[in-house]
Image (spheres, rainbow, N blue to C red):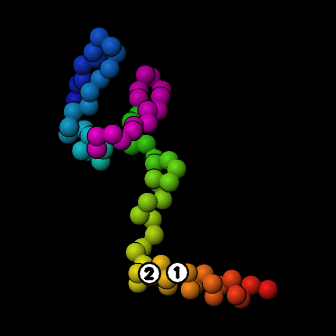
């Protein structure tokens, strides 16, 4: 069990080993949940907004040029009733 010191501003600093254990890097956010008997539970905050979608799709099988994309778009519109 690690002990932390509270600063005069009411802040604590988590030791590197705890950050690594939680999989946290500088700039990431932490969620704090209040449990019974004065216990706090920390966990890495879930990404919000567009950042949560980054990397969720596999890379494309092939890379299309702008001309290829325009052709595919035009063909798609041409099939519209």
Question: Can you say whether 44 is above or below 9 in the image?
Answer: below
Quarter of the image where the N terminus is located: top left
Find numbered disc 2 in the image and state the secondary structure of the residue it sits on.
loop
Query: Dot 2 corresponds to which residue?
Result: 65
Residue 75 lies left or right of residue 21; in this view the side is right
| The image quarter in which residue 7 lies | top left
| Magenta stretch: includes residue 29 | yes
Quarter of the image where the C terminus is located: bottom right
Rendered residue at 28%/40% (across/down): 26
Find numbered disc 1 in the image and state the secondary structure of the residue it sits on.
helix
Residue 15: percent from the left, percent from the top?
A: 21, 33
| The image quarter in which residue 24 lies | top left
Rendered residue at 28%/17% (across/down): 6
Q: Nearer the viewer, residue 4 or 35?
A: 4
Residue 68: percent from the left, percent from the top?
A: 49, 85
Q: Nearer the viewer, residue 56 or 79?
A: 79
Do the residues bearing badges 2 and 1 touch, measured as CB atoms within 8 Å?
yes
Residue 60: percent from the left, percent from the top?
A: 42, 78
Question: Can you say whether 70 is above or below 15 in the image?
Answer: below
Q: What is the distance, in whole Å, between disc 2 and disc 1 at their CAs? A: 6 Å
Query: Dot 1 corresponds to which residue?
Result: 69
- Magenta region, residue range: 25-40
Question: Can you say whether 55 is above or below 18 in the image?
Answer: below
**Residue 81 numbered mark, or none:** none
């Amino acid at each position: 069990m690690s002990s932390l010191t509270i600063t005069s501003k009411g802040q604590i600093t988590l030791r590197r080993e705890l950050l690594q254990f939680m999989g946290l890097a500088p700039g990431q956010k932490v969620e704090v949940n209040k449990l019974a008997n004065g216990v706090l539970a920390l966990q890495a905050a879930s990404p919000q907004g567009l950042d949560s979608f980054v990397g969720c799709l596999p890379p494309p099988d092939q890379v299309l040029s702008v001309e290829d994309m325009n052709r595919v778009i035009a063909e798609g519109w041409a099939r519209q009733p």
